[in-house]
Amino acid sequence: MPLKFDLSKCTGCKLCQLACSASHYDVFNPEKARLKMIHDYNDDGIKIASKSCIFCKKCEKVCPEGAISNNGKWMIVDPEKCIGCNTCVTNCPTKIIFLNEKKSTICDLCGGEPKCIEWCPKGVISLRQKKGAAV
């Protein structure tokens, strides 16, 4: 279930990225976040874009060690199996997977309780509902 963004509400505070890095690494560092908010400042103001896992499962398909799986809700990297070969990183269409301490890192929706959603003061981020799911 990928994240959904209403960028018209985003102020560029990056609290979502800070929440992500804090919940996974106990550090407030947007560079370690598993989602990205991209801010482009120009003469017309600010343009904001987002990058997050779209759950296309390409990483799972290309992983030579079978270290990446999907539990039906989010992607999971098994650090015991991951050899840090970078194959998933180079094949990710959104370029959101990265290596952290030589292991693949991908959004796991914080185990079903995404901190980025919880911490966003403007309600920019939500979970995209599966087609046919009750709202």
Image (cartoon, helix red, strand yellow):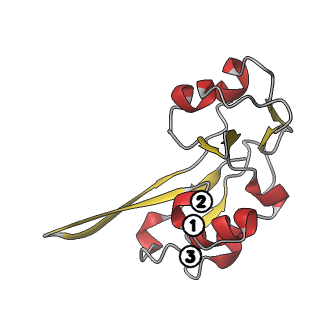
**Disc 3 secondary structure class:** helix
In the picture, residue 82 is in which quadrant? top right
Q: For the point 70% across and 75% down, which residue is it?
A: 118
- For mark 3, what is the residue? 15
Kind of residue sitting beneath label 1: Gln
In the picture, residue 33 is in which quadrant? bottom right
Q: For the point 52% across and 60% down, which residue is it?
A: 31
**Disc 2 secondary structure class:** loop
Judge whether 36 appears above or below 79 on screen: below
**Mark 2 or mark 3, earlier in chain:** 3
Q: For the point 45% across and 65% down, which residue is it?
A: 7
Residue contact between numbered discs 1 and 3, judged by CB atoms under 8 Å: yes
The span from disc 2 to disc 1 (Cα, nearest Å) is 5 Å
> Residue 33 got which mark?
2
Kind of residue sitting beneath label 2: Ala
Judge whether 54 appears above or below 33 on screen: above
Residue contact between numbered discs 2 and 1, judged by CB atoms under 8 Å: yes
Q: Position of residue 94 (x, y in %)?
A: 50, 39
Packing grade of label 3 (10 A; few <14, some 14-19, many >=20) is: some
**Disc 1 secondary structure class:** helix
71 sits left or right of 63 in the view: right
Outermost residue on the left side: it is 43
**Mark 2 or mark 1, earlier in chain:** 1
The span from disc 2 to disc 3 (Cα, nearest Å) is 10 Å
Q: Position of residue 113 (x, y in %)?
A: 80, 64
- For mark 1, what is the residue? 17
Q: Nearer the viewer, mark 2 or mark 3?
A: 2
